[in-house]
Image (cartoon, rainbow, N blue to C red):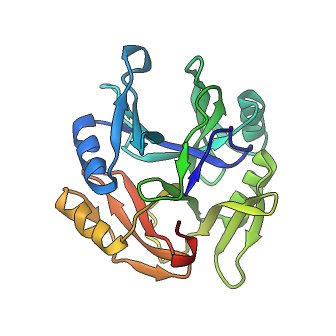
Amino acid sequence: MTELTEPYPQGAPCWVDMMSTDHRVTAEFYAGLLGWEFEVGGAESGHYAMALVRGKPVAGVARMPPDARFPVVWTSYLATDDLDESLARVAAHGGQELVPVFDTGGPGRGAVAVDPTGASFGLWEAGTHIGAYLVREPGALWWNELATRDLAGASAFYRDVFGLEPQPEPGMRYSRLALGGHPVAGVFGMDAEIPPEIPPHWMTYFAVPDAEAAAARAAELGGVVVHEVVRSPFGWFTTLGDPLGATFRVIQPPPSSRG
């Protein structure tokens, strides 16, 4: 487990959130699956809800505006020391601002952009809110991973904008993105076997003690199990969908990574 109190280094995934069309359904599902409790903000925050594990923020849930036409998705945010500079670099390297800068006052400033391969992601310049204060334990973030049809192009973009160094996995369409030699995220190259209707996207992994049990529980709570549990050297994982359509993964870390 890791508890954090200082801002994340630039380029590191630091937060995930979603815009929900039904906060009650979202809260009940993730509380039942991941044990989350929720702290709901006031009207000034749009009643933004912090998902808590052991009383510490691990993710966020915003309310979808009535006139919005966005799908319900989990958005991964990358930390930035200077939001305006990072957005300028996004544009200079072929990306595009998707959601304009929003300033939450003391907590910090953010925006949402899309990379040149079509995957959207958030940027967060921390103020008093650094992002996830707890990671790598059950119910909390474990990993963030980009799925794209242009592995080389995406890897170059995140290197040039955020300084994330690609570490290709030999013999695989996969690369880790590292800061100071330490992997902080991954990039998966989707091939022709992946249906074309699945767009490039960032995937969120939440840690669970038992991936098989989590899949069964998700189904009981009205979610969808997209595929059976995959057993890999990095952990046992499966892709799930919540009742409102947001997809994510749960991962049972390998024994050497627990605790």
The image quarter containing residue 87 is top right
Residue 93 visible in the snapshot: yes
Residue 200 visible in the snapshot: no
Q: Is residue 115 left or right of residue 73?
A: right
**Residue 30 location (% of width, % of height):** 31, 49
Measuring 34% from the left and 54% from the top, which residue is drawn there?
34
Measuring 49% from the left and 71% from the top, which residue is drawn there?
253
Is 196 drawn above or below residue 98 in the view shown?
Answer: below
The image quarter containing residue 24 is top left
Measuring 75% from the left and 60% from the top, which residue is drawn there?
178
Could you say which is closer to the camera, residue 216 or residue 147?
216
Q: Residue furthest bottom?
A: 171
The image quarter containing residue 21 is top left
Q: Quadrant of the N terminus?
A: bottom right
Is 64 drawn above or below residue 180 in the view shown?
Answer: above
**Residue 90 location (% of width, % of height):** 72, 40
Is 115 drawn above or below residue 172 in the view shown?
Answer: above
Q: Is residue 246 left or right of residue 258?
A: left
**Residue 246 location (% of width, % of height):** 36, 51
Could you say which is closer to the camera, residue 115 or residue 101?
101
Is 67 drawn above or below residue 77 in the view shown?
Answer: above
Q: Residue furthest top?
A: 44
